[in-house]
Image: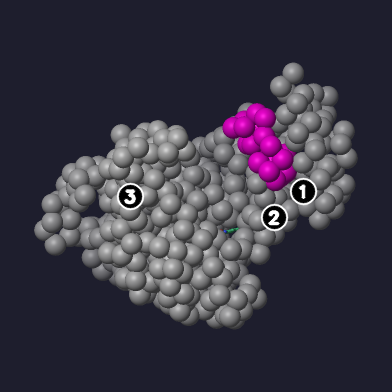
Amino acid sequence: MQVEFELLMPKTLSEALTMLAPAAERGLADSSTPVMPIAGGTNVIPDLRDGRLRPAVLMDVSALDVLRGIRRENDLPGGLPGGLPGGRHGGGFIIIGGGTTIATLLTDPLIAQHAAALRQAAAVFANPLVRNRATVAGNLADASPAADTAPPLLVLDAEVELTSRSGTRWAPVEAFMVGVRKTVRRPAELITAIRFPVPPANSASAFHKVGLRKADAISVLSVAVLVECDADGLCHKARIALGSVAPTPIRARAAEDRLQGQVLTPALIEAAARLAAEAARPIDDLRGSAVYRQRVVGVVTRRLLTAVVDQARKVSSQFFGESPTPEEQSHATQSHHTQS
Amino acid sequence: MQPKVITLKVNGRRHAVASMPNVTLLYALRDLGYTDVKNGCEKGDCGACAVLLNGKAVNSCLVLAWQADGAEIVTNAGLGTLDRPHPLQAAFADTGAIQCGYCTPGMLISAKALLDATPHPSDGEIREALSGNLCRCTGYDHIIEAVQLAAERMGE
Ligand SMILES: Cc1cc2nc3c(=O)[nH]c(=O)nc-3n(C[C@H](O)[C@H](O)[C@H](O)COP(=O)(O)OP(=O)(O)OC[C@H]3O[C@@H](n4cnc5c(N)ncnc54)[C@H](O)[C@@H]3O)c2cc1C
Ligand code: FES
Ligand code: FES
């Protein structure tokens, strides 16, 4: 590459955090040089080549094993922000290391069981070559409106763990991205993990991306939904998130509010889908017009909601209802498995 | 910028090379003589530069050489030789899946990664697995056919 930079290669997390700590804190004269992390490089390297990025110093975080992997924890050390104890819903949390690749999301059993929307996003993310390098932290830190992990993480109520030498803080994904390629990450912080509460068994989630081709497409728009409801279709919780229709991935709160506490009839789903379309503030660009995006958001939201409500109701009737149909019975065998 | 000596194990051979921080694995490999690794776009779009990095198929243009320090790399030339081609390489030749040949080494790497994980892929699985590899010549059909043929032959 034409562009020149120094490259730091920390071997441990604490070494990495020390390298990121403001130069002044380290007693160095030159305090003006922020150090830029590089993980999979799938955003950074094309940006370096195009001249969109000119960092003086890059720091490789791809060798930090502590940033990789997916686990479930029932009690979080330190509890939740605001002094709440860990383990909301009694189900604990799924914790994804920031350096986990998209390829890992696609094959991980915890993600398959508890976060169908995230797995589905991983399946249509870039192509297999890119998925083997691209990381979740890199996707969120890049903060593209089209970042495909964002809508699923929004409906899962996920939070980003930001770690610096002076400690750790958690930011909801929704508050983390504040504009096109803008986040609240401070220069001295690394994204060390992403976590979300394990959704209850009587919930289901899904993701759909509209691209210009079947694979390796950038989102024209994307929708993720999550619904928790009982066997009669009474909705306890609804989440709807949209990608590529605003400067950041967004939640469609008016649409969510329309569903929560109500019985989920087709008419109600239709109304919520219309509200989701209204929440979209898309632009015209080479991948699609604003009018197209807004209409299709409504269609995709309706289809996804219909599918997940059906799934969540079936699971609910298995646990709380009477005499399920044979079809429900076979589905319930699978969902029983997801309970363990 | 200062160079650093890194080690790369390529197709079973160890190399120690002095490399600058802004050199990608693609250039490091080509400079070592592994010119079967092709430079198409240098931004992750075409897959011509694909190699196996510690067993995983990646775009070598999106990896800094220093990030690959100590890694095991397999290029197309490491899959087989002219005398003893890999079944995928033989099948590509037999089905006419190669025209100009520029995309072929990358296609073979993605196809190898697919068959390692999924020995009997469906048509759709092959297309998905090769979705990061562009071909401007063949129209893809013969390439899909080649992967199917190789899978059959390897299953025998
Ligand atoms: C061909 C191609 C197709 C693509 N398709 C898609 C797609 O379909 N959907 C999609 O969403 N994206 C896509 N992308 C974009 C890209 O692959 C993703 O955004 C990816 O997740 C970035 O991760 P990375 O590890 O490669 O990040 P890098 O490029 O290494 O870094 C990206 C940003 O994150 C920062 N960063 C990385 N790790 C950390 C950390 N631990 N803490 C703090 N900051 C960090 C970097 O400083 C940089 O600002 C595509 C890219 C290419 C080249
Ligand atoms: S040269 Fe690496 S993907 Fe095109
Ligand atoms: S054979 Fe020419 S690019 Fe594929």
Magenta segment main secondary structure: helix
Asked if residue A99 can be seen in this view, the reply is no
Q: Upstream in the sequence, badge 2 or badge 1?
A: 2
Residue assigned mark 1: B103
Mark number displayed over residue A220 = none
Q: Which mark is residue A231?
A: 3
Instruction: Determine the residue positioned at 52% across, 70% down.
Output: A297
Q: Nearer the viewer, residue B29 or A107?
A: A107
- Rounded to the nearest angstrom, the CA distance separating label 2 from label 3 is 48 Å
Q: Residue furthest top?
A: B156
What chain does badge 3 belong to? Answer: A
Of tags 3 and 1, which is closer to the observer? Answer: 3
Give above or below for A332 relative to A52: above
Label 2 marks a residue whose chain is: B
**Quadrant of image for the C terminus of chain A:** top left
User: Mark 3 to mark 1: distance in Å?
Assistant: 53 Å
Q: Identify the residue at image location x=37%, y=33%.
A: A337
Q: Residues within 10 Å of mark 1 (few under 14, many from 20)?
A: many
- Cα separation between marks 2 and 1: 8 Å
The relative height of residue B60 versus residue B84 in the rendered view (above or below) is below
Inspect the image, locate mark 1, and give the three-letter code of the amino acid beneath it. Cys
Kind of residue at badge 3: Ala
Image coordinates for residue A112, horizontal then vertical, percent: 43, 42
The stretch in magenta equals: B106-127
Label 2 residue near ligand 2, CB within 8 Å: yes
Say what secondary structure mark 2 lies in.
Answer: loop
Q: Mark 2 — residue?
A: B46
Disc 3 vs disc 1: Cβ atoms closer than 8 Å? no
